Every structure is written in structure tokens, then in C-alpha cells.
Amino acid sequence: MRRIGVMTTGGDCAGLNAAIRAVVRRAVGHHGLEVIGIHQGTMGLLEDPPRAEPLTLAMADAGLLRAGGTILGSVNRGTPFSFPLPDGGVTDLSAKIHAGVAKLGLDAIIGIGGDGSMRIMHRLMQTGHFPFVGIPKTIDNDLGATEYAIGHHTAVEVAMEALDRLQPTAASHNRIMVLEVMGRDAGHIALAAGIAGGADVILIPEIPWRMAPVAAAIRALRERGRNFALVVVAEAVRTAEGETVFAGPSAPGAMPRLGGVGARIANALEKATGAEARVTVLGHVQRGGSPGALDRIVASSMGVHAVDLAVAGRFGRIVVWAEGRVGDAPVDQAAGAARPVDPEGDMVRVARGLGICLGDR
Ligand code: F6P
């Protein structure tokens, strides 16, 4: 083992640079290896010569722990196995990716990505020499195999801070404040932020909702003297009638990214309760910026473990966080295995225990 490549794939989140820093510090500082940063994910491997540069300890020390985004960049053009062509057709570029790995002389590749990326990496391992170790990241926290993915905690903290700021203005004007958060098809951010930020109602895709219990919950608040309500909605929610209302990009017939879900729910709440409502759509604020403490710890632990797996020749593994510590699992356990909120799980139990309305009763 002489040279490790590292890349970031898919959407960015807080903590990616902290993970890159950990990889460099462990690989260069501890194991005496070279680390090559591959730019723009697998796109960097397609170029000739590949778009890549050595990452040094000095670069790792230059504020990476704190920095948002990814210094390596991440272009998302779908799968290289059916790469879109300008004429509307598709082509398989996987051989070029394998050639890029060979050109860079990489003995290992550490890829920091979400479920889509892990699926691609898993397939690349099956179609050629691709000595891969994965590190999970996604603010949505819906990757199978791991309890936490890099970026989730910071997104939750940002949404919690938004609720802290919405509460006083809601109370000043007797309003219902609807906060729409990200999460794609999963409600982990909404549920965690709603609990942490004192929401009265949390609507998530895993629990179909109806207006009657939500309006009743808001009326009950009024009856006990409360003049405001905080409502957190995931960008995808499902009504009890089965209608899916989705603001995210992955659903067929997705709504325009203009805060569709939150606005619709705020309008409906005004009609049902007679109270004035306002909507805030947090959007990409949840992804950018400096990582919180837990994301720094998770990213650092995962970066170190990924390098150790590579040095031990344990390829085809993804680093995971389970029961309070770092470990690893086969990549295919994370490839395509979504982990939605468990409607009977601990977090839902906590929310119900606090008297938060989840829209179903
Ligand atoms: O998967 C991460 C995520 O931020 C989702 O929560 C959100 O639906 C989506 O990506 C936004 O994607 P884009 O940055 O392409 O608009």
C-alpha cells in the first residue's frame, strides 16, 4: 500500500472536509502513505489526465476541520454506467473510471458518499479493479447499515436554530410558523429537529397525516393559553388518503423547488384553524457551513477507520456508526438500502411522549 485516492460524491454536507482531513492525517501522518484528492467525484477520474492532486498534511491543517462544502468538489451526473450524452443517448464510462484509477496508481480509493454513490462504487468493484472503502454522508441520514451519516447532525442543529428563532416571532404575532426542512424521502431531520426545537406538530413521510388531528392539536394549544404553534414539515409528506406531496428532486412529478409542501400546509392550516400562518423553507442552509461537534467527531472517526481498513486490505467495506462507535459493514448493505424513520421507533415514541402531534392522531 503506497497511494490512496479520496473523493467526495453526491450532494455536499457539513463534515466532508473534516473527513478528508482525517484521511490525510491518518494516511500521511500515521501510515506514511500518499493521498491523492480526486476532484469532482468520479468525473475527475474520467479526465485525461485525471483531475487530481496530492493532499498534504499542511493542506489538511489549513482549516479543513471547520470548513463547509468539499475542497474536492462533487459533480452529480448520475451513474457512469449509463452516462447521459448530449444527443439524449447514454454510454457506459466505467472502463474509463478503471483506467483513471490505474493512471493515478491508486492502491485504494476512499469514497465519501450517499446511497446512490455506494451503489455505483459497488458496481465498479464488480466490473474491474476498484479497491474501494466507503464513508457514509447524507444530511437525510437514511443510509442503511449506519445509525449516523456525516452531515445529519449539523442539518438538525441548523433546523433547531431556525425553530429557536421562529418561536419568539411566532409568539409576538400569535402565528403558526411552518418550517419546511430537507430529508428527501425520509423524515429523520424533521423528527430530530422538531424534538430538539420544541415543535408542536411534526409531519414526516413515514407517518401519513390528516388535517383533523393537526387542527385539533393547535386548537388544544390555544385552549391552554398558547398563542402560537411551531410546525415542522419534511419536504416529502404523505396524506392519509395516499397523496404524496413532495418538494424534493427525486420523486416523479416533483414539485418545483419553491417550498411547495410547507406553503400548502400553511395555507391549509390557516383555513382549518383561523390562525395566521407563515412558512420558512430552510433549503440548502442545512447543508452548507461549518460542521457541529458531533459531525466533526463522526467524520474524524470515520476517516481514520477508512484508512485503517484500506491499509488492512479490507476493501468493499463501508464505515458505519453503530451503538456509539465506529465500525464497518459490507458496502452493499448501504448500497440502495434506505433506512426510513421507524414509525414505532424510539424517536417517534419520544415525540409522542412529549405530546407532539405527528398528524395521524
Ligand atoms: O439528499 C440530500 C438533499 O439535500 C435532500 O435533502 C434534498 O432533497 C436534495 O438533496 C436537494 O438536492 P439538490 O441540492 O440537488 O437540490
Image (tube, helix red, strand yellow):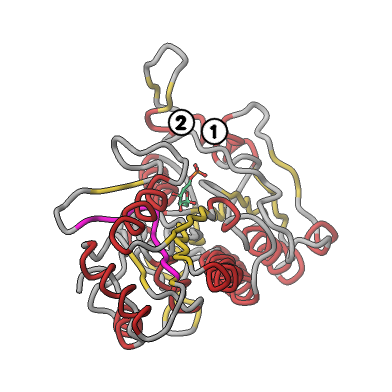
Q: Going 23% across and 70% down the picture, which residue do you hit?
A: 213
Q: Which amino acid does label 1 sit on?
A: Ala
For label 1, the SS is: helix
Q: In this figure, which residue is indicated by the disc labeled 2?
A: 95
**What segment is highlighted magenta in the picture?**
230-239
Q: Where is residue 269 in the image (x, y as percent from the top left)?
A: 33, 59
Task: Using residue 125 as the reference point, say whether residue 355 is left or right of it.
Answer: left
Q: Position of residue 226 (x, y in %)?
A: 43, 80
Q: Where is residue 204 in the image (x, y as percent from the top left)?
A: 32, 63
Q: Position of residue 20 (x, y in %)?
A: 66, 59
In the rendered image, the vertical position of residue 51 relative to residue 16, given as above or below: above
Task: Using residue 246 as the reference point, say whether residue 26 is left or right of it.
Answer: right
Looking at the rendered image, the quarter that the N terminus falls into is bottom right
Q: Is residue 199 found inside the magenta-colored segment of the image? A: no
* Front residue (pair 204, 86): 204
Q: Going 68% across and 29% down the picture, which residue do you hit?
A: 49
Q: Going 30% across and 35% down the picture, which residue do you hit?
A: 253
Q: How far apart are marks 1 and 2 (CA)?
A: 6 Å
Q: In this figure, which residue is indicated by the disc labeled 1?
A: 99
All told, the count of numbered labels is 2
* Front residue (pair 250, 356): 356
Task: Using residue 63 as the reference point, say whether residue 81 is left or right of it.
Answer: left
* Front residue (pair 219, 327): 219
Q: What residue type is labelled 2?
A: Ala
Q: Which image quadrant for residue 18?
A: bottom right
Q: Is residue 232 found inside the magenta-colored segment of the image? A: yes
> How many neighbours does mark 1 have within 10 angstroms: few (below 14), some (14-19), or many (20 or more)?
some
Looking at the rendered image, the quarter that the C terminus falls into is bottom left
For label 2, the SS is: helix
Residue 36's disc is none
Magenta stretch, main secondary structure, is strand
The reply to whether callout 1 and callout 2 are in contact (CB within 8 Å) is yes
